[in-house]
Image: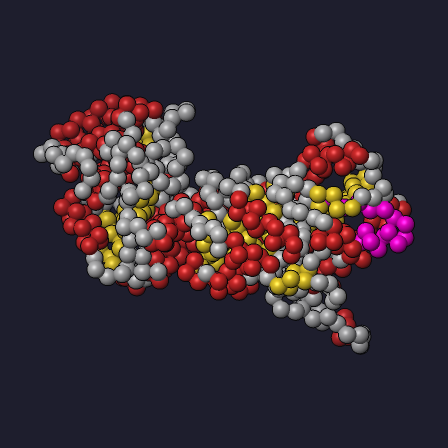
Amino acid sequence: MRRSKYSRPDFLTQGEDRPRLTTSAMIASIAGPDQPTRPAPFGHALAALAQTDDRIVGMSADLAKYTDLHVFRSAHPDRFYQMGMAEQLLMMAAAGMAREGFQPWVTTYAVFASRRAYDFICLAIAEEMLDVKIVCALPGLTTGYGPSHQATEDLAMFRGMPNLTIIDPCDALEIEQAVPAIAAHKGPVYMRLLRGNVPLVLDEYGYTFELGKAKLLRGGRDTLVISTGLMTMRALEAAKALQKDGVDVAVLHVPTIKPLDEQAILAECRKQNRLVVVAENHTVIGGLGEAVAATLMRSDVRPAGFRQIGLPDEFLDAGALPTLHDRYGLSTNSIAASIRRWLDA
Amino acid sequence: MTQIGHNVSLPERARRIRRHALRMGEVQGQGYIAQALGIADVLAVSYFHATHYRPDDPEWEGRDRFLLSIGHYAIALYAALIEAKIIPEDELETYGTDDSRLPMSGMAAYTPGMEITGGSLGHGLGIAVGMCLGLKRKKSASFVYNLFSDGELDEGSTWEAAMSAGSYKLDNLIAIVDVNQMQADGPSLGVMNFEPLVAKFEAFGWFTQRVDGNDIEAVVRAFDAARSHPEARPRMIICDTKMAKGVPFLEARERNHFLRVEPHEWAEALRIIDAGGTA
């Protein structure tokens, strides 16, 4: 429930003087203060790949700079197409480019690709299995600008689209590895993008991205967290924190939302009768959580419990990202607290 | 300019296209016949005067691309593709039937010579823009033709595409808009006033012509001018056409967006087309 715009904020009337966080730039960094990061991993990976793959062109709808595609544009200026602030056109033109044998990598924000351009991706690209790669910034709750920019339901929408492969990478390493894998895959792909200085996490786990594969990053006897995107990073941090309290948490990372690696999910759930927690940077409706639940039900696998960490079915607040991640349960502390609560119940 | 049938006149091609369309309509007993009859002359000029293609190799790289943005005009394009020998004539009897290569709404995966999946209106022009950019990257001399409808002028995506074509100066793009003044809910200008069209497209940077789309000589001149125009601008041919052209009793129907034709009327329509065709 949103606060009323007709009453002044409580902290003004109650004289509270603690410092309040402020909404940062459009794309707030999700990196912690001491976290190692890599700059623009998507842009650099695509620019490097394009040196050996002539099919690749880049296209954006006035958001090259905010989707790290400017790195590609600088490296290959004659292979970049500015389509203006017109996401429908972006998708149509990418379809046309793909029809002529090129492999367009198109970028915009996830809200615009999903909500505004859905029909164009569906009919002009996916129905024809065209080789278009759609890479979108601001997935889920990664900006404090409010519902106009928070793509909280993109996975739900895109999961319903036949032929479309969906990737939600966790960190810089995964993005770097996913780019060539996506290029090698023939057909349309939607990738959620983390841009700017992107945390580096998975190098610690000897991880290698494989399209369509879920990977167990750590084992644990008490709870199995099945997570995707940046929530894997948070789940790993929460698992480390819980370890100190003697709570043993396994993390299965599922970067490919569709097609879902049902085999790996079922195998891990069958291995031990644990509480299963699905964590995603997305509404709890129609995303990884419901996909995993349906997979378990269809195979008659009944874990000791099933819980979801995800965004509520609401239009979310504007504000500072750390505040919002705490408020909606996506922060490391909230995840650890939720798991503790569920295990104690 | 095509490789076949130099000895057959364009009016005769148009007559045959109308005939193929009527025969397909008869299979279904109804359909978008009025649009097919209205656009037949433009299709005759497109396939037998303007575009390069190889009937036995519809995906020949050197072809001109002819996009049908208006999926429900499929019956018209099938008629042209049959006349162009890209689709065998006997397949017209399968129009709209289960497992046919000729579904009611045009789809690229179903039909040889069908370049795109139309039907979700407002897609063709933007896809054409991407293809034109791609062809220029490949240094191809091919043109992209996009046939769309006056109803699609209501779609915002059409104008996104129109603006970008002007911005990119796509001189390999020839768009043809069929202004037949009829949409699903009634006369087009009553649904949404899109005029003045010439001024609009000129303002968007297009070399724009407006012709009577049922005057074959005028259409030929417009296509020739579009292909040879010296300026680096996209080319728009606004074709004013008459719904159900050539069959007066169908022309006279007020609501002819989706025509229901009585069984005995098909033979009558064919008789009228045949009588007037070669004159």
A171 lies above or below B70: below
**Residue drawn 30% across and 34% down?**
B57
> How many numbered markers are drawn?
0
The residue at the point 68 percent across, 62 percent down is: A37
Quarter of the image containing the N terminus of chain A?
Answer: bottom right
**A196 sits left or right of B172 in the view:** right
Residue B114 forms part of the magenta stretch? no
Q: Residue furthest front?
A: A52
Q: Viewed as shown, does residue A126 lie left or right of B121?
A: right
**Quadrant of the drawing holding the C terminus of chain A:** top right
Looking at the picture, does residue A302 appear above or below residue B62? above
Percent of width and height locating residue B20: 25, 29
Q: Position of residue A47 (x, y in %)?
A: 52, 58
- The image quarter in which residue B81 lies: top left
Q: Is residue A254 visible?
A: yes
Would residue A286 be seen by someone viewing this image from the given angle?
no
Name the residue at the left extreme: B279
Q: Is residue A245 left or right of residue A288?
A: right
- Asked whether B58 or B118 is in front, the reply is B58
Q: Which quadrant holds residue B233?
A: bottom left
Q: Quadrant of residue A210?
A: top right
The residue drawn where x is 18% and y is 34% is B4
Q: Look at the image and give the residue range highlighted in magenta.
A: A238-252
Between residues B44 and B134, which one lies in front from this camera angle? B134
Q: Is residue A40 left or right of residue A313?
A: left
Residue visible at 24% across and 42% down in the picture:
B52
Q: Position of residue A7 (x, y in %)?
A: 71, 69
Q: Position of residue A9 (x, y in %)?
A: 73, 70
